Image: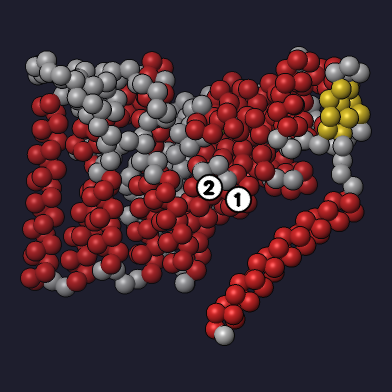
Amino acid sequence: MGSDPQFAKYPDLTLAQHIFTLANTPQSAQPTSLPYLQNAIKEHKMAPLYRHLAHPAEGVLNTVGEGSAQTAIPPQKAPSRRASLVSSNLLPSKRPVPSGILPWDEALYEELKADNERELEGFQKEEEEAEEKAGETEVQAARSKRAEFWARVGDKDKAITAYETVFDKTGPLGTKIDIVLAMIRIGLFFNDKAFVKKQVDRASILVESGGDWDRRNRLKAYKGLHLLTVRSYNLAAPLLLDSLSTFTSYELCSYSSLVVYAVLAGALSLKRVDFKAKVVDAPEIKAILGSGDEKPDEEMKDVSASTAERAAGIVNVAALGSSSAVEQQTESPVDVSSLARLVNSLYGGDYRSFFLSLATVEENFLTQDRYLYEHRAWFVREMRLRGYQQLLQSYRVVGLTTMAQAFGVSVDFLDRDLAKFIAAGRVSCTIDRVQGTIETTRPDDKNKQYADVVKQGDALITKLQKYGQAVRLRGSERA
C-alpha cells in the first residue's frame, strides 16, 4: 500500500453530471440538478464556471443575448456564439439548449469573482512567505493549494497549468501520479477526450515505473472509464470488471456506477463463456443487480450506497459519478432491474425480453448518463446485432417469421435491420423473402485459412517486388 491519494477532492464529477442532466432534460432536472448546481457555485465560489454556463451572451446554458440578469442589458446586435474553452464540451449534444436554465446574477458573479481574487492573493502571500522563511515543501504546499483552487472553481486551463507547475517541482512518484489523475478528472469533467487520453498514457508510464498497488488499481478504473467514453468497449470491459474487487476511486464515480459501466461493456464485448463467468455469475455484480427476476422490496426505498448490495433490483445510481456518501444517501434510488433482465435474457436466449429490457436500459441509463449518452444509438445497434448473431449461431436455417416472433418485432423490421448487418459483413447469412427463411452461411475454417494465406502471400510478394526494384535502382545509381 502506498500513501493516501492527494488532489482527489476536485473537480466534483457529480457536478458535471448535473450540468449534463440540466441541459439534456431541463424540465425534469429543475427540482434536483438546478439547486445542486446553484449551491455548488455559491459554496465553492465557482465564478469562472458560472460565467461560462450562465452569462447572457456567452453562457452555454443561455441563447445569445438572453438570460435573467438582474441588470437589464441594452439591446445590441446579437454577437455570434463564441465557443468557450472551458465548457464547450459540457453539453450533451450540439442541439440548442433553452435559454434561462441557469439564471444569471451579475451581483452574484462579481461577489464570487471578488472572493476568488482575495483567495488567490492569500495563496500568493503564503507562497512568498514560504520562499523567504520556509523550505521547498511549504512552497509546494502553497502551489498545490492554488492548483486545487482552480480545479474547484472550474477553470480548466488555469487548473491544468497550475497542476503542471506542481508536477514539475514534485519529487515523489506517488504525488506525481496523483497530480496526473487529478488532470484526468479535469478532462473528464469538461469532456476533453484527447486530453484525457494523453494524461492516461502519461499516468500509465508513471505507474509502470514504480507505482504502488493502490494507484495501479485506481488507474485501472480511470483507464476503463476513458475507454468507455471513446467507444472502446472491448478494451474497457476487462479493466472495469477487474476494478470491481479492488475499487477505491470514489472520486471518479460511485461503486454502483462502476458496476453499471462494467455490465454494459461486458454485455457488448465479452464472449459467451467470459460473459457468463465475469458478468452473469460475478458476485460483485449480482450483489448490485440481484437475479433479475426479483422485484424491489417496498421497505427498501431508502437505499444508500452502504446497503445497496443488500437490495435486489434497486440501487442508488441517481447521479452517476457521485463519490460522497452523504450525497448518495439523499438521492432517490434507481431501479436497475432492467439491467439485470438485459444480462439474464441475453445469456438465457429470451430475445423478446432482451429487446424490451434493451429499450428500458436505453431510456433509464444510456440517455441519462453523460459518459454513455453520446454512444447510445451505437450501443443499442450493437446489442441488437449481438442478439441476432447469438440466435443464428444455433441454426442452419430459421424462418423469418419465427425469428421475428422470437425478438418480438415485425418481419419487415427484422428484414431491414438484418439486411444492414449482412451488407456490412457483420452477419454471415442470407435472407430469402420468397421462402421466408434465413440461411446462415458459415465459412469453412480450412478454406478461410487458405484464402487468408493466399491474400497475405500476395501482399508480401508485392512488397518484396517493390523493395527489389528500389534496391536495384539505388545500385544502378551508385554504379
Q: Nearer the viewer, residue 274 or 313?
A: 274
Q: Number of callouts in the render? A: 2
Residue 344 visible in the picture: no
Q: Please report the residue visible at 89 percent of the width from the left and 26 percent of the height from the top.
A: 398
**Residue contact between numbered discs 2 and 1, judged by CB atoms under 8 Å:** yes
What scheme was used to colour the molecule? secondary structure
Disc 2 or 1, which lies upstream in sequence? 2
Q: Nearer the viewer, residue 390 or 319?
A: 390
Q: How far from the left and from the top, in percent, is residue 97?
A: 35, 21
Q: Please report the residue visible at 12 percent of the width from the left and 18 percent of the height from the top.
A: 76
Quarter in which the C terminus is drawn: bottom right
Give amino acid for label 2: Leu
Q: Nearer the viewer, residue 223 or 316?
A: 223
Disc 1 element: helix
Disc 2 element: helix
Residue 92 visible in the picture: yes
Give amino acid for label 1: Leu
Q: Residues within 10 Å of mark 1 (few under 14, many from 20)?
A: some
Say left or right for 145 vs 345.
left
Residue marked by disc 2: 227
Residue marked by disc 1: 235
Say left or right for 63 vs 174.
left
Q: Please tell me in which quadrant of the rendered image residue 473 appears.
A: bottom right
Q: How far from the left and from the top, in percent, is residue 418?
A: 75, 26
- Of all residues, the one furthest to the bottom in this rendering is 479
Say left or right for 239 vs 191.
right
Quote the CA–CA distance across marks 2 and 1. Answer: 7 Å
Q: Please report the residue visible at 61 percent of the width from the left and 38 percent of the height from the top.
A: 264
The vertical placement of 222 against 330, above or below, is below
